[in-house]
Image (tube, rainbow, N blue to C red):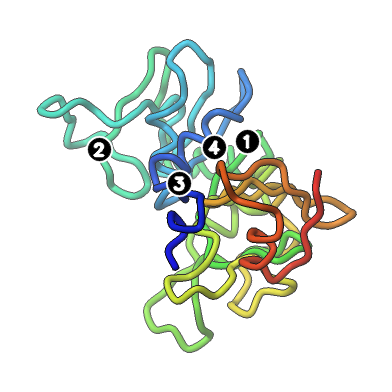
Protein backbone atom coordinates (compact mmCIF):
# COMPACT_ATOMS: atom_id res chain seq x y z
CA UNK A 1 0.00 0.00 0.00
CA UNK A 2 1.34 3.44 -0.93
CA UNK A 3 1.95 6.15 1.65
CA UNK A 4 -0.79 8.29 0.10
CA UNK A 5 -3.26 5.43 0.40
CA UNK A 6 -2.41 5.22 4.12
CA UNK A 7 -3.51 8.84 4.64
CA UNK A 8 -0.34 10.89 4.34
CA UNK A 9 1.77 12.34 1.55
CA UNK A 10 5.57 12.49 1.91
CA UNK A 11 7.30 15.74 0.99
CA UNK A 12 9.17 15.99 -2.30
CA UNK A 13 12.69 17.37 -2.61
CA UNK A 14 11.40 20.94 -2.94
CA UNK A 15 9.14 20.54 0.07
CA UNK A 16 11.98 19.16 2.18
CA UNK A 17 14.23 22.08 1.22
CA UNK A 18 11.47 24.60 2.01
CA UNK A 19 10.92 22.97 5.41
CA UNK A 20 14.62 23.38 6.25
CA UNK A 21 14.66 27.01 5.05
CA UNK A 22 11.70 27.81 7.29
CA UNK A 23 13.74 27.02 10.40
CA UNK A 24 16.94 28.95 9.63
CA UNK A 25 17.06 32.00 11.91
CA UNK A 26 17.86 35.56 10.94
CA UNK A 27 21.56 36.35 10.81
CA UNK A 28 22.97 32.84 10.52
CA UNK A 29 25.89 31.92 8.26
CA UNK A 30 24.95 28.67 6.54
CA UNK A 31 26.72 26.23 4.22
CA UNK A 32 24.56 24.17 1.87
CA UNK A 33 25.83 20.73 0.89
CA UNK A 34 25.39 18.82 -2.36
CA UNK A 35 21.97 17.44 -3.34
CA UNK A 36 18.71 18.48 -1.67
CA UNK A 37 20.50 21.08 0.53
CA UNK A 38 21.34 23.21 -2.52
CA UNK A 39 17.59 23.76 -3.03
CA UNK A 40 17.34 25.49 0.35
CA UNK A 41 18.75 28.68 -1.22
CA UNK A 42 15.59 28.99 -3.33
CA UNK A 43 13.35 29.11 -0.25
CA UNK A 44 15.06 31.52 2.14
CA UNK A 45 12.80 34.62 2.19
CA UNK A 46 14.62 37.56 0.55
CA UNK A 47 13.79 39.80 3.51
CA UNK A 48 15.52 37.42 5.94
CA UNK A 49 19.24 38.00 6.32
CA UNK A 50 20.77 34.55 6.01
CA UNK A 51 24.31 34.48 4.60
CA UNK A 52 24.77 31.36 2.48
CA UNK A 53 28.27 29.95 2.04
CA UNK A 54 29.54 27.67 -0.70
CA UNK A 55 32.91 26.03 -0.12
CA UNK A 56 34.12 26.83 -3.62
CA UNK A 57 34.36 30.46 -2.50
CA UNK A 58 31.02 32.30 -2.27
CA UNK A 59 29.76 34.12 0.81
CA UNK A 60 26.31 35.59 0.29
CA UNK A 61 25.01 33.08 -2.27
CA UNK A 62 21.48 33.61 -3.56
CA UNK A 63 18.86 31.38 -5.21
CA UNK A 64 19.05 29.80 -8.64
CA UNK A 65 18.93 32.38 -11.45
CA UNK A 66 15.88 32.98 -13.61
CA UNK A 67 15.92 31.29 -17.02
CA UNK A 68 18.27 32.99 -19.49
CA UNK A 69 19.79 35.07 -16.67
CA UNK A 70 22.52 32.59 -15.77
CA UNK A 71 26.13 33.60 -15.26
CA UNK A 72 28.14 30.59 -16.51
CA UNK A 73 31.00 31.44 -14.13
CA UNK A 74 28.87 31.74 -11.00
CA UNK A 75 28.29 28.23 -9.65
CA UNK A 76 28.06 26.52 -6.28
CA UNK A 77 30.08 23.51 -5.10
CA UNK A 78 27.77 21.25 -7.13
CA UNK A 79 28.57 23.32 -10.27
CA UNK A 80 24.93 24.48 -10.37
CA UNK A 81 24.26 28.04 -11.55
CA UNK A 82 23.51 30.38 -8.66
CA UNK A 83 23.18 34.10 -7.93
CA UNK A 84 24.85 36.32 -5.36
CA UNK A 85 22.92 38.56 -2.98
CA UNK A 86 23.74 42.26 -2.47
CA UNK A 87 26.78 42.50 -0.22
CA UNK A 88 28.01 39.03 -1.16
CA UNK A 89 31.64 38.31 -1.92
CA UNK A 90 34.02 35.85 -3.52
CA UNK A 91 37.00 34.35 -1.71
CA UNK A 92 39.75 31.92 -2.66
CA UNK A 93 39.40 28.23 -1.81
CA UNK A 94 41.81 28.37 1.12
CA UNK A 95 39.95 31.29 2.71
CA UNK A 96 36.63 29.54 2.14
CA UNK A 97 37.80 26.47 4.05
CA UNK A 98 39.25 28.69 6.76
CA UNK A 99 35.69 29.90 7.32
CA UNK A 100 34.61 26.25 7.69
CA UNK A 101 37.51 25.03 9.82
CA UNK A 102 37.56 28.16 11.96
CA UNK A 103 34.08 27.50 13.32
CA UNK A 104 32.53 30.56 11.66
CA UNK A 105 29.48 28.77 10.24
CA UNK A 106 26.36 28.71 12.39
CA UNK A 107 24.97 25.80 10.40
CA UNK A 108 25.76 23.30 7.68
CA UNK A 109 22.93 21.50 5.87
CA UNK A 110 24.11 18.18 4.44
CA UNK A 111 22.55 15.26 2.62
CA UNK A 112 22.89 11.81 4.12
CA UNK A 113 22.75 8.07 3.48
CA UNK A 114 22.37 7.20 7.18
CA UNK A 115 22.19 8.96 10.54
CA UNK A 116 22.54 7.14 13.87
CA UNK A 117 20.57 7.95 17.00
CA UNK A 118 23.70 9.46 18.60
CA UNK A 119 24.28 11.85 15.67
CA UNK A 120 26.83 9.84 13.67
CA UNK A 121 26.64 10.70 9.95
CA UNK A 122 27.35 8.56 6.88
CA UNK A 123 26.93 10.53 3.66
CA UNK A 124 29.81 9.77 1.31
CA UNK A 125 30.01 6.01 0.72
CA UNK A 126 27.71 3.03 0.98
CA UNK A 127 30.53 0.49 1.25
CA UNK A 128 34.20 0.32 2.17
CA UNK A 129 34.65 -1.26 -1.27
CA UNK A 130 33.14 1.66 -3.23
CA UNK A 131 35.46 2.65 -6.07
CA UNK A 132 36.10 6.29 -6.97
CA UNK A 133 34.23 7.89 -4.09
CA UNK A 134 35.83 10.69 -2.12
CA UNK A 135 34.78 12.06 1.23
CA UNK A 136 35.57 15.62 0.09
CA UNK A 137 34.71 18.72 2.09
CA UNK A 138 31.87 17.02 3.96
CA UNK A 139 34.27 15.88 6.68
CA UNK A 140 35.41 19.49 7.26
CA UNK A 141 31.86 20.81 7.29
CA UNK A 142 30.55 18.09 9.60
CA UNK A 143 33.04 18.96 12.33
CA UNK A 144 33.65 22.66 11.56
CA UNK A 145 30.12 24.05 11.61
CA UNK A 146 28.51 24.86 14.95
CA UNK A 147 25.44 22.79 13.96
CA UNK A 148 24.75 20.13 11.33
CA UNK A 149 21.28 19.45 9.98
CA UNK A 150 20.81 16.50 7.63
CA UNK A 151 18.08 16.37 5.00
CA UNK A 152 17.33 13.03 3.31
CA UNK A 153 14.62 10.51 2.45
CA UNK A 154 13.36 8.69 5.54
CA UNK A 155 13.86 5.24 4.01
CA UNK A 156 15.79 3.80 1.06
CA UNK A 157 14.15 2.97 -2.26
CA UNK A 158 13.62 -0.59 -1.06
CA UNK A 159 12.09 0.54 2.22
CA UNK A 160 15.03 0.11 4.62
CA UNK A 161 15.37 2.71 7.40
CA UNK A 162 18.05 5.38 7.09
CA UNK A 163 17.75 6.51 10.72
CA UNK A 164 19.44 3.77 12.68
CA UNK A 165 20.68 2.69 16.06
CA UNK A 166 24.14 2.54 14.51
CA UNK A 167 25.35 3.45 11.00
CA UNK A 168 26.43 0.53 8.81
CA UNK A 169 28.12 2.69 6.14
CA UNK A 170 31.55 4.34 6.55
CA UNK A 171 31.20 7.44 8.75
CA UNK A 172 31.71 11.00 7.58
CA UNK A 173 31.93 12.21 11.19
CA UNK A 174 30.87 11.01 14.62
CA UNK A 175 28.19 12.65 16.80
CA UNK A 176 27.93 15.71 14.57
CA UNK A 177 24.23 15.84 13.60
CA UNK A 178 21.79 17.78 15.78
CA UNK A 179 18.65 17.67 13.61
CA UNK A 180 17.28 15.46 10.81
CA UNK A 181 14.79 16.55 8.15
CA UNK A 182 13.16 13.84 6.06
CA UNK A 183 10.24 13.59 3.69
CA UNK A 184 8.17 12.41 6.66
CA UNK A 185 9.36 14.23 9.77
CA UNK A 186 11.71 16.56 11.61
CA UNK A 187 13.73 14.91 14.39
CA UNK A 188 16.04 16.38 17.02
CA UNK A 189 18.97 14.36 18.34
CA UNK A 190 19.02 14.90 22.10
CA UNK A 191 20.80 13.33 25.09
CA UNK A 192 17.52 11.50 25.74
CA UNK A 193 17.24 10.11 22.21
CA UNK A 194 15.47 11.06 18.99
CA UNK A 195 12.65 13.54 19.57
CA UNK A 196 9.91 13.98 16.96
CA UNK A 197 9.50 17.72 16.33
CA UNK A 198 7.14 17.62 13.36
CA UNK A 199 5.56 15.16 10.90
CA UNK A 200 3.68 15.41 7.63
CA UNK A 201 -0.07 15.66 8.00
CA UNK A 202 -1.79 12.34 8.57
CA UNK A 203 1.29 10.38 9.65
CA UNK A 204 0.91 8.77 13.06
CA UNK A 205 3.73 8.35 15.57
CA UNK A 206 3.47 4.56 15.26
CA UNK A 207 3.72 4.71 11.45
CA UNK A 208 6.83 6.88 11.74
CA UNK A 209 8.39 4.52 14.28
CA UNK A 210 7.72 1.58 11.95
CA UNK A 211 9.90 3.30 9.34
CA UNK A 212 12.69 4.13 11.81
CA UNK A 213 15.11 1.64 13.34
CA UNK A 214 16.15 3.93 16.19
CA UNK A 215 13.67 4.45 19.03
CA UNK A 216 11.67 7.67 18.82
CA UNK A 217 10.03 9.77 21.52
CA UNK A 218 7.51 12.57 21.33
CA UNK A 219 9.03 16.01 21.81
- Per the model, the C-alpha gap separating discs 1 and 2 is 22 Å
Nearer the N terminus, badge 1 or badge 2?
2
Q: Residues within 10 Å of mark 1 (few under 14, many from 20)?
A: many
- What number is the disc on residue 81? 2
1 and 2 marks in contact (CB < 8 Å) = no
Q: Earlier in the sequence, mark 2 or mark 3?
A: 3
Whether residues under marks 2 and 4 lie with C-beta atoms below 8 angstroms apart, the answer is no
Read off the residue under disc 3.
Answer: 11
User: Mark 4 or mark 3: which comes first in sequence?
Assistant: 3
Q: CA distance from mark 3 to mark 1?
A: 27 Å
Mark 4 vs mark 3, foreground winner is 3
Q: CA distance from mark 1 to mark 4?
A: 16 Å
The label number, if any, that marks residue 105 in the structure image: 1
**Helix, strand or loop under label 4:** helix
- Which residue is under mark 4? 20
Query: How dense is the environment of label 3, judged by Cα within 10 Å: few (below 14), some, or many (20 and up)?
Result: some
Q: Secondary structure at mark 2?
A: loop
Could you classify mark 4 by the number of other residues whose Cα lies within 10 Å: few (under 14), some (14-19), or many (20 or more)?
Answer: many
- Position of the N terminus by quadrant: bottom left
What is the distance, in whole Å, between disc 4 and disc 3 at their CAs?
A: 12 Å
Q: Any mark on residue 172, and which?
A: none
Closest to the observer, 110 or 14 = 14
Amino acid sequence: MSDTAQGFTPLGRTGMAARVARDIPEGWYVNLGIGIPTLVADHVPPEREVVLHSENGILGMGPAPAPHRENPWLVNASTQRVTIRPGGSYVDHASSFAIVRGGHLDLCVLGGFQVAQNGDLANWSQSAADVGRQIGGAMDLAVGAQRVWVVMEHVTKDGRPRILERCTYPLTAARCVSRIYTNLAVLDITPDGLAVVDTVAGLSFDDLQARTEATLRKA
